Image (spheres, rainbow, N blue to C red):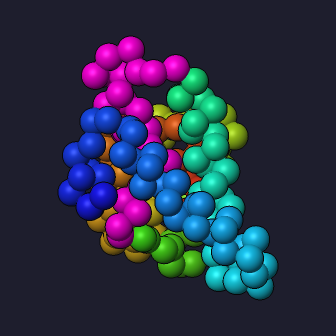
Amino acid sequence: MTEAEWLAATDPTPMLKYLNGPVSLWVEIREREPILSVRYRSKPASEHKLALFESRYCRTLPADDEEAAERCEILRCIFGNPFRPVTTDPSWLTSTVLSLARQMYESRDFSPMPILADALQDAGCDQPDILAHCRGDGPHVRGCWVVDLVLGKT
């Protein structure tokens, strides 16, 4: 899968196949030589997110193309753009940013996402992927890559 395919996907199947590849590789490497798992410390979080997505959204086939497209949007909310990894600058993690992210994570109410974008920008964040995601229409769900990134859950 290419970045363009990831961003334009309306069928979650190829996205899930793409995500399963790296996760499976991590498990395989870990079983052969556990010491290598240290290099892949973020993979268990990805594996957990993938399992959560599959348990919530993949019990049944999508009813129609619209539902399939929505599942793709949810995958993009959870995993972001895997072709362009983003990191945080510790200076962005102000008390306001952390408080907003915690509130959204705990309440599962993501309506303050645009406010989080403003708080991040006020703190010096200039990452277009982060700001665009926060200001985007969503859907936003628990496991959102930006909220998890801010809270150190990725």
Determine if the magenta segment contains residue 23: no
Q: Give the side of residue 102 with respect to residue 123, left or right.
A: right
Front-most of 132 and 99? 132
Could you say which quadrant of the image residue 132 lies in?
bottom left
x and y percent of residue 52 in the render? 63, 40
Q: Residue at x 50, y 78 (%)?
A: 89
x and y percent of residue 107 in the render? 66, 34
Determine if the magenta segment contains residue 67: yes
Q: Give the side of residue 37 with respect to residue 131, left or right.
A: right
Q: Residue at x 48, y 74 (%)?
A: 87
Could you say which quadrant of the image residue 75 lies in?
top left
Could you say which quadrant of the image residue 18 lies in?
bottom left
Q: Give the vertical position of 72 relative to 70 (above or below).
A: below
Q: Residue at x 58, y 36 (%)?
A: 54
x and y percent of residue 122 in the render? 41, 66
Identity of the residue furthest to the top in this view: 63
Q: Give the side of residue 42 with respect to residue 135, left or right.
A: right
Whether residue 42 appears in this view of the structure is: no
Q: Give the side of residue 139 with respect to residue 91, left or right.
A: left
Q: Give the vertical position of 139 relative to 30 (above or below).
A: above
Magenta stretch: helix, strand or loop mostly: helix
Whether residue 20 appears in this view of the structure is: yes
Q: Residue at x 38, y 38 (%)?
A: 12
Front-most of 141 and 2? 2
Magenta span of residues: 60-84
Q: Quadrant of the N terminus?
A: bottom left
Q: Give the vertical position of 123 relative to 46 (above or below).
A: below
Front-most of 37 and 121? 37
Identity of the residue furthest to the front in this view: 32
x and y percent of residue 62 in the render? 41, 21
Q: Quadrant of the C terminus?
A: bottom right
